[in-house]
Amino acid sequence: MILSARRRRIDADLAARARWAAARWGVLHANYRRTLSGFGELIEVPVPPLSTITPTVSLLDTLGAIEVLGTPGPPDSLPRCHLAFPFDPSGTPRAVIPSLQITEADGGSWLVTVAPSPEEHDGLEELIFELLPTIAPPTIDTPVVVTSLDEIPSPAAYADSVALGVERIRSGALRKVVLARAARLVASEDLDPAAVLQRMAEREPACTRYAFPAPEGGRLIGASPELLISREGSVVASHPLAGTMTLSEVNADAGALLRSRKDLDEHRLVVEDLAYNLRPLLDTLDVPTGPSVVRLRSVAHLGTELRGTTRTADDPHLLTLLAALHPTPAVGGVPTTAALAAIEELEGRRPNYFAGGVGWCNARGAGEWVLAIRGALLDGPRCEVIAGAGVVVDSTPEGEAAETRSKLASVLEAVAPGISEKLVVLSEREGARPDPELGRRPNG
């Protein structure tokens, strides 16, 4: 398909309404660097699974062929593709080019219309100037009435899985495995994705908010703290997070996380894997000697920012880097193949996009992907939230159950304010006591 694009400036009010529309019906990628909204027709572009991806795919050809007309603007306002990929690297990603794209960056807002013919741009612009003023803002203070709330599996059953994971690690079959569990709620009315995202933005302003249509139906939205990969010009960056304590623990002892052998080991496995896979592809790569503490609303993580430079302007492409990294030990484990097998056995098959990635790219090779974590799948009045914890040799079943509960509660609080208290009561009632026969073998 041959597409053309036309760009023009718009005011801040229209750009804000575009964010609400994108959260509800389109695609959104927003952080302190830029806000990218897209809706209208989501033009599908075929992309192979990451396990088989090559630098030249139809996505890049399609973006490169788009002629941009109209008002000059910053590079961020070039036509782009939004792409989400599943946790399973052999699964099929979904890539879409929105016909209506809004960019908020560099002190201004730009609208780009994308269409098969130049004649269609007038109609798209008329549509957006008629539609956007009618978009209602999210009402974030309206109470959300929850009719049911469940944890799947229960804290005790999850603790049993963690204990089995520790046994595998102590036997030498694994070094790390990330195991997840879910919370599901049903509200009395349909949940508004724009309102949930607005609450996420207020709770976690440093995170990247995302929205994407889920392949199984509904909307995948979230506020991810973890940058998987980005490229701007020749500069490549990744900021993995692994190793977690509650914020209250870190506030009580500022150095506790940096002294924790369990968390330092978990983090080191992730950084070593990313560096190992990036070095052969880049001209330079800077890896700090130690992590820093990244504080969020309810938890704190160990984080290390890796920065490198590419060999040339085109090599390697961002998609090539993405394929080399996913799935990282931050969401999978070490070694990768054994960890993925253990996840399927102990946890079951994960929903399509959880712990995959969401992001964007343009024809110049610029783009950014974050891990699809700290999010929710919204479908009418139903919501599912999933949270994982990295299991290593020093993990305890009770500790990982508590960590996942804290992560679940943080996201649920943005979905239905006040619900996290009910989750704590539910968890305490069901308990997180593993089978006493599991995980008893000594380290070795």
Image (spheres, helix red, strand yellow):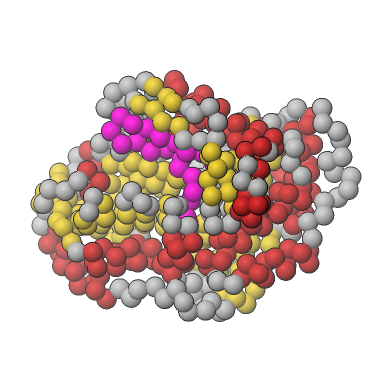
Q: Residue at x 15, y 44 (%)?
A: 67
Residue 169 in which image quadrant: top right
Q: Residue at x 88, y 48 (%)?
A: 436
Residue 226 part of the magenta-drawn span: yes
Quadrant of image for the C terminus: top right
Quadrant of image for the N terminus: top left
Q: Main secondary structure of the magenta part?
A: strand
Residue range (magenta): 215-241
Q: Residue at x 55, y 61 (%)?
A: 411
Which of the two residues, 101 or 2, is positioned nearer the viewer here?
A: 101
Residue 53 in which image quadrant: top left
Where residue 54 sits in the image (x, y, percent)?
A: 38, 29
Where residue 420 sits in the image (x, y, percent)?
A: 63, 67
Position above or below: 154 against 359: below
Tell me, yes or no, if residue 100 can be seen here. yes
As drawn, is 82 to the left or to the right of 343?
Answer: left
Position above or below: 154 against 269: below
Which of the two residues, 291 or 274, is positioned nearer the viewer here?
A: 291
Tell me, yes or no, if residue 333 can be seen here. no
As drawn, is 409 to the left or to the right of 372?
Answer: right
Residue 137 part of the magenta-drawn span: no
Where residue 321 sits in the image (x, y, percent)?
A: 41, 31
As drawn, is 223 to the left or to the right of 173?
Answer: left
Q: Residue at x 18, y 61 (%)?
A: 10
| Number of numbered discs visible in the structure rendering | 0
Where residue 96 sits in the image (x, y, percent)?
A: 34, 50
Residue at the right extreme of this rendering: 437
